[in-house]
Image (cartoon, rainbow, N blue to C red):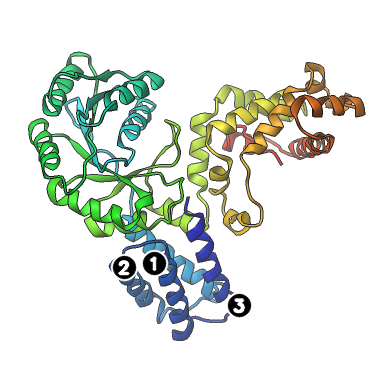
Amino acid sequence: MFEDIAEKFEAVFRKLRGQGKITETNVQETLREVRRVLLEADVNYKVAKQFIEDVHRRAIGKEVLSSITPGQLMIKILYDELVRLMGSTRIDIAFSNIPPTVIMLAGLQGSGKTTFAAKLANYLRTRGHHPLLVAADTHRPAAIDQLEQLGEQIDIPVYADRERTAVQIAEDGIAHARKSVRDVVILDTAGRLHIDEAMMREVETIKERVKPNEILLVVDSMIGQDAVAAAKAFHDRLNFDGVVLTKLDGDTRGGAALSIRAVVEKPVKFVSVGEKLDALEPFYPDRMASRILGMGDIVTLVEKAQEQIDEKKAQKLEEKIRKADFTFEDFLEQIQEIKKMGPLSQILSMIPGYSRVATSQAVDDRAFVKIEAMIRSMTEEERRKPHIINGSRRRRIAMGSGTTVQDVNRLLKQFEEMKKMMKGLRRGKFARAFGGTVLPA
């Protein structure tokens, strides 16, 4: 997410490093580069222009402390202005005091709205809610089937009626939620074109009849400025409460995330960062600004680890580390835990400074597959006692895993180095902070 724009910002900051003070000249040069980066990221022209003006006003006349370089000061100013541009603070869903809370989803065709409905239901369920999905898309063929299949995958009920209108389905779904003691209703309405007057009237009628507590506009971030135009068109008709950006893990330049709030003055509430149904993150402007500037996002990384990793397993691993009893069985288990957190490249992008080396050290998520294959090709005794793996055993493991002897040698060497590192850990601070997770070398 935002790797391209982060790399370009890093290139801009490199030019500032080594200069003794902030001057009108180097500020103008830097802002000219920042403007180019923003426009290449498909940020709205008016938004980029205002952003540059705000940064310029703050930068000129600033006295640089002896401990701060111009590069550091400009990063701080850019960070503050990016946070302000994207909304300053996290704004959550407005839950009703009297359940059920009704959340209506709207969006263009193909924006990923139905998948987001299931992701949101799964997200809310993990936070103690009992959601009901309502299939109110009566226009797209197989839309109801898709939502039912997604609901089955995450074990969340779906209300559907193939004989009634979208408005009737929405009303009946809410009544069903009350009877079945469901505290959140998620209405999946039909995807539409903002120029389709009949379908826009339909979603307006649903809003009028069910009076949702929250209306979320689901926007495909990969369509850039078209996403901003669509958001404005929907805002004029629905006055929605928040925006959801989907497909941020794809080939997106980031312009929609930076522009949309400034244009429609509505907060981004969630971002979808993968195809899996747990690949949904609440939107925090400060954390997103940190990622965009290549400063990582340790808070989200730790939260992901705490959510996905079993605490008892973490404590068990901590004991093994203390006793220097870490085996390949434990290593395999840790790989499974890491995979739950998402793609390796996404995890590493949250580590501060990672963007600076990302281009020279490409991350291949298939590395885990190769490591798993080699470990699974070992016998139980070999996993527990790696020191017994001699030349013939290494050849057998390589053949069984479709790798080379060199790959096996490299794995064994990295494993021994990791064990040495673990022996130096004391009091379990690292294990507790990251739920016991370790990354392979």
Residue pushed farthest front?
Answer: 141
The residues tagged by marks 1 and 2 sit, at their Cα atoms, a distance apart of 7 Å
Q: Which residue is mark 2?
A: 45
Residue at position x 63%, y 57% in the image = 357
Residue situated in front as seen by the camera: 247 or 122: 247
Counting residues from the start of the chain, the first of labels 2 and 3 encountered is 3
Q: Amino acid at mark 1?
A: Leu
Q: Amino acid at mark 3?
A: Gly
Q: Are circles 1 and 2 on residues that touch, CB within 8 Å?
A: yes
For the image shown, how many numbered marks are present on the structure?
A: 3
Residue pushed farthest top?
Answer: 179
Query: Compared to 384, does 428 lie above or below?
Result: below
The residues tagged by marks 1 and 3 sit, at their Cα atoms, a distance apart of 27 Å
- Location of residue 39 in the rendering, given as x and y in whole percent from the top left corner: 39, 67
Query: Compared to 360, does 102 lie above or below?
Result: above
Tell me if 411 is positioned left or right of 106 in this view. right
Q: Which mark is residue 18?
A: 3
Q: Is residue 129 visible?
A: no
Q: Amino acid at mark 2?
A: Tyr
Q: Which residue is mark 1?
A: 39
Q: Is residue 65 visible?
A: yes
- Location of residue 371 in the rendering, given as x and y in whole percent from the top left corner: 71, 32
Residue at position x 66%, y 57% in the image = 360
Label 3 SS: loop
Label 2 SS: helix
- Location of residue 422 in the rendering, given as x and y in whole percent from the top left corner: 74, 36
The residues tagged by marks 2 and 3 sit, at their Cα atoms, a distance apart of 31 Å
Label 1 SS: helix
